Image (tube, helix red, strand yellow):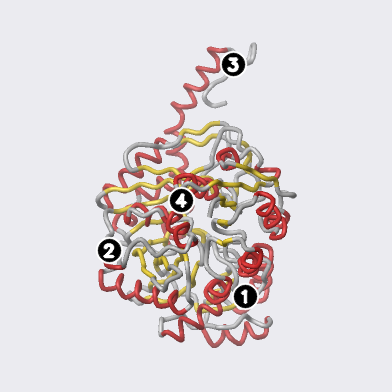
């Protein structure tokens, strides 16, 4: 490989471009008209504009991206995550065009990326799975029949997707028809595939995932686990590695189950096998993400590996750089996602223009971001703005480092989830490591949110008072006086 086209946007595109440069590869970026001034576009060696702002008209347009790759004479494409990263049709088209897909084979994506076929494989290998269907639902009537057999609550899930898209928790039969229609519609919009299946919804589980790497020579290893239990609307907000609950025995058992799955599918590249851990400590296979995960930096911190570099090595036909016995987990890492969402208003999207950025820095602080002053945050794409990641020798120290880093970071122009992340780091239950996917609903109640909002505003008043003072000193508006309330 000599030139890599990055078929994605935002922070993940920038992250791939950086590793490509370190490995001696040229990089080409694609961008919608809306993203033409994005930071990743500026950092790439070349850039090409896609037609249309909507994802379906730009980053999901396979023919357009392949045509640009051919024009750029790129011999490989890195899909990042989301968009076309788990699309077997796209991987197959690249294969036919002689362009290397930096990811699994089309066959492996079909078998593992599709959640129904992945469940079949897990059952075949004896990996525990929640009760439910292994085929997509045909219609509403079948959904009612299966839900009665499984027992409410049930979870409707998109067969072709991830990231919380096309998912609905159903508590009662009366909700099932509307929930199914919504799940199918959301899945079709996000993944171009409206297939949905149903499984038993586990109450208050922990979300544990295992990072795997596999090469084209039959070698496969796991790199330990990540805890991703703090979520809202099935999307992760805080991730850490390692988990506070896994024993060495559980880590070995779950890791071996994950490796068995990818070996059976003749997988190549980086992937993640996700599990749910119930309140009794039993684990159940959830799904396989046949791509790089948003939260991969925490694994990089505790293993010392650059996972994108490993993806490049595997795609080039090289063997894995280490064996399972060489994998050592060191210290503790935490990642928080900085989303363009209103912490105080049920995490609703916040749109606008970024006016000011102050990134956190310091020892063992990593900021994966494509933020810049003047960035327009629109409703076209995911609300992720940045990922703030820290490492330290132990979990309490990592929490303290994250608190300091969050206090440093400033994003002005849109509301962000920084206040929520600060709340989590101060939360006693989080500090004790007593987590579940119900954390946000149970801990971040309306009462807590209102109290936190008042304290947050009080903390910011001196800052705004100083802003007002500066504005008055330079007299930006003749005859107009600014005060802290304004």
Label 1 and label 3: CA atoms lie apart by 58 Å
- Above or below, 292 against 195 in this view is above
Q: Earlier in the sequence, mark 1 or mark 3?
A: 1
Where does label 3 land, which residue? 481
Label drawn at residue 149? none
Where does label 2 land, which residue? 326
Label 2 and label 3: CA atoms lie apart by 64 Å
* Circle 4: element type: helix
Where does label 1 land, which residue? 196
User: Residue 412 at what x, y percent from top left?
Assistant: 54, 34
- Left or right position of 30 against 316: right
Where does label 4 land, which residue? 447
* Circle 2: element type: helix
User: Residue 381 at what x, y percent from top left?
Assistant: 63, 51
Q: Are marks 4 and 2 in contact (CB under 8 Å)?
A: no
| Residue 208 seen by the camera | no
- Left or right position of 188 against 463: right
Q: Earlier in the sequence, mark 4 or mark 1?
A: 1
User: Residue 369 at what x, y percent from top left?
Assistant: 50, 43
Q: Earlier in the sequence, mark 4 or mark 2?
A: 2
Identified at 48% across, 59% down, the residue is 293
- Camera-near label (2 vs 3) is 2
């Amino acid at each position: 490989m000599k030139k890599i086209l990055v078929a994605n946007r935002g922070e993940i595109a920038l992250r791939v471009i950086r590793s490509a440069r370190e490995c001696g590869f040229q990089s080409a970026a694609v961008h919608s008209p809306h993203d033409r001034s994005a930071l990743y576009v500026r950092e790439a060696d070349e850039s090409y504009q896609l037609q249309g702002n909507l994802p379906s008209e730009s980053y999901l347009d396979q023919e357009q991206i392949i045509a640009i790759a051919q024009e750029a004479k790129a011999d490989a494409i890195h899909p990042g995550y989301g968009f076309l990263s788990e699309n077997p049709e796209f991987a197959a088209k690249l294969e036919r065009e002689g362009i290397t897909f930096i990811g699994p084979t089309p066959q492996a994506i079909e078998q593992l990326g599709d959640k129904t076929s992945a469940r079949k494989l897990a059952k075949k290998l004896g990996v525990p799975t929640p009760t439910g269907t292994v085929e997509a639902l045909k219609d509403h009537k079948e959904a009612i029949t299966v839900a009665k057999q499984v027992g409410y609550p049930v979870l409707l899930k998109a067969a072709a997707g991830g990231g919380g898209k096309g998912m609905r928790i159903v508590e009662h039969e009366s909700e099932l028809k509307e929930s199914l229609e919504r799940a199918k519609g959301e899945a079709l919009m996000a993944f171009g595939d409206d297939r949905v299946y149903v499984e038993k919804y586990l109450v208050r589980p922990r979300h544990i995932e295992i990072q795997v790497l596999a090469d084209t020579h039959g070698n496969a290893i796991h790199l330990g686990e990540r805890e991703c239990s703090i979520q809202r609307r099935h999307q992760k907000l805080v991730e850490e590695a390692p988990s506070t609950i896994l024993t060495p025995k559980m880590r070995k058992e779950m890791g071996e189950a994950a490796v068995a799955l990818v070996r059976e599918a003749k997988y190549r590249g980086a992937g993640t096998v996700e599990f749910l851990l119930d309140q009794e400590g039993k684990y159940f296979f959830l799904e396989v993400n046949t791509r790089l995960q948003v939260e991969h930096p925490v694994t990089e911190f505790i293993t010392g590996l650059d996972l994108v570099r490993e993806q490049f090595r595997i795609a080039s036909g090289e063997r894995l750089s280490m064996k399972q016995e060489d994998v050592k987990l060191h210290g503790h890492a935490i990642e928080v996602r900085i989303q363009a969402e209103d912490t105080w208003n049920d995490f609703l999207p916040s749109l606008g223009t970024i006016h000011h950025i102050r990134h956190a820095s310091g020892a063992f602080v990593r900021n994966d971001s494509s933020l810049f002053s003047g960035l327009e945050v629109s409703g076209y794409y995911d609300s992720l703005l940045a990922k703030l990641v820290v490492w330290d020798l132990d979990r309490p120290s990592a929490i303290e480092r994250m608190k300091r880093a969050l206090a440093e970071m400033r994003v002005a122009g849109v509301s962000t989830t920084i206040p929520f992340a600060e709340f989590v780091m101060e939360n006693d239950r989080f500090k004790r490591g007593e987590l579940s996917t119900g954390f946000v609903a149970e801990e971040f109640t309306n009462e807590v949110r209102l109290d936190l909002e008042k304290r947050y505003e009080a903390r910011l008043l001196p800052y705004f008072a100083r802003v007002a003072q500066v504005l008055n000193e330079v007299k930006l508006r003749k005859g107009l006086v600014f005060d802290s309330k304004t």
